[in-house]
Amino acid sequence: MKRAAVALVLAIAAAHSAAAQAQPFPSRPITLIVPFPAGGPTDTLARILGERMRASLGQPILIENVTGAGASIGVSRAAQAAPDGYTVHLGNWTSHVGGGAMYPAVHEAALELAPISLISATPLMIIGKNALPPNNARELIDWLKANPGKASAATVGAGSAAHVCELYFQQKTGTSFAFVPYRGGAPVLQDLVAGQIDFFCAEASQTLSFLRAGNIKAFAVMARERWPGAPDVPTFDEIGVPGMYISFWNGMWAPKGTPPEPIARLNGALVETLADPAVRQRLTELGHVIFPREEQTPAGLAAFYRAEIEKWWPIMQAANIKPE
């Protein structure tokens, strides 16, 4: 009798275990780690995506802002999470390229992440104060060459996209100017409007309200095509400096070892989200350019990320950029 009771208990336990394993993914909320503060552009993107992905997945997406140390804390938290699909990570140029070049822990953690999909990008744009003598990008380059070391360019931290963009600009145009560090893009734009700094390589989406108000000049966008948010601003290709492309891109990852099924489910939900007309309109209003459907794959993100490291790390290493 006792043996029969034990057998029954074991059978019930096995049935419960099998039922639990058979539950379709996802069966509970998913945490999306954002390695930047709440209220910033990456956090805003995460909340837009999370709200729509909930409809596709049938589970809420809980945003967790894990900040500090050049995004290394958030990237590491994501890499160390259980590889079950219930923790995902929203990363970008700063967290995965700039941060990875300066903080070995970031790069090591990034290698422990499995790609889900590319999402969107906003190109960087050279903007300047209204009092700056040049009125277009060709004039800006000529003026900088005629006045070496006299102009001031804002950065928002060593190894930031703005800093690397300006180093790249120097390298491609043979110009020189002084770098002035700031704590963030908002104070830079305030000083540009006030005429306290000469120019800045800004994430294009930051510039819209200032451009529309006529408070700053826009010289050129660093992309293959003109940016829809400011279609009158030429590319560097158009002014005779080809190949000057840098964008503030975003991608989604999961911990390495996450099974193919959750990766595929998450990718499908993200692809569906990026195809939603309301989401596309909202992201366009914020200045995002959504990657083509064929690039919204784990392989697409992996290849893109690898190419970005190969392009930007040598420039950062040559400039001997170190954490501040």
Image (cartoon, grey):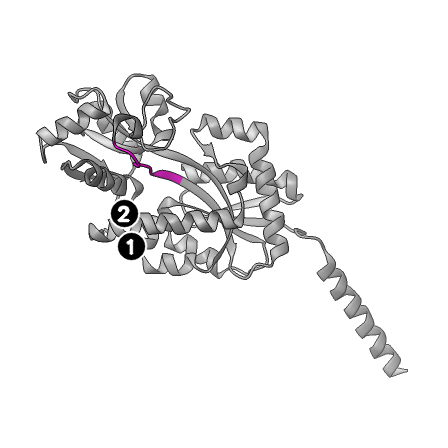
Is residue 68 in view?
no
Span highlighted in magenta in the image: 241-248
Question: The N terminus appears in which quarter of the rendering?
Answer: bottom right
* Discs 1, 2 touching: Cβ within 8 Å: yes
Q: Earlier in the sequence, mark 1 or mark 2?
A: 1
From this view, report whether residue 59 is shown above or below residue 137: below
Residue wearing tag 1: 102
Q: Quadrant of residue 149?
A: top left
Helix, strand or loop at label 1? It is helix
Query: In this view of the protein, which residue sits in the foreground, 48 or 269?
Result: 269
Q: What type of secondary structure mainly makes up the magenta span? A: loop
Magenta stretch: includes residue 128: no
Whole-percent x and y of residue 237?
A: 30, 30
Whole-percent x and y of residue 51?
A: 58, 37
Query: In this view of the protein, which residue sits in the foreground, 60 or 242?
Result: 242
Whole-percent x and y of residue 230?
A: 37, 22
| Amino acid bearing label 2 | Gly
Query: Few, some or many C-alpha atoms within 10 Å of disc 2 (few <14, some 14-19, many ≥20)?
Result: many
Residue at x-position 47% and y-position 58%: 79
Query: Few, some or many C-alpha atoms within 10 Å of disc 1 (few <14, some 14-19, many ≥20)?
Result: many
Residue wearing tag 2: 159
Residue at x-position 36% and y-position 22%: 209
Helix, strand or loop at label 2? It is loop
Question: Left or right of 209: which side holds 24?
Answer: right
**Which residue is at the far right?**
1
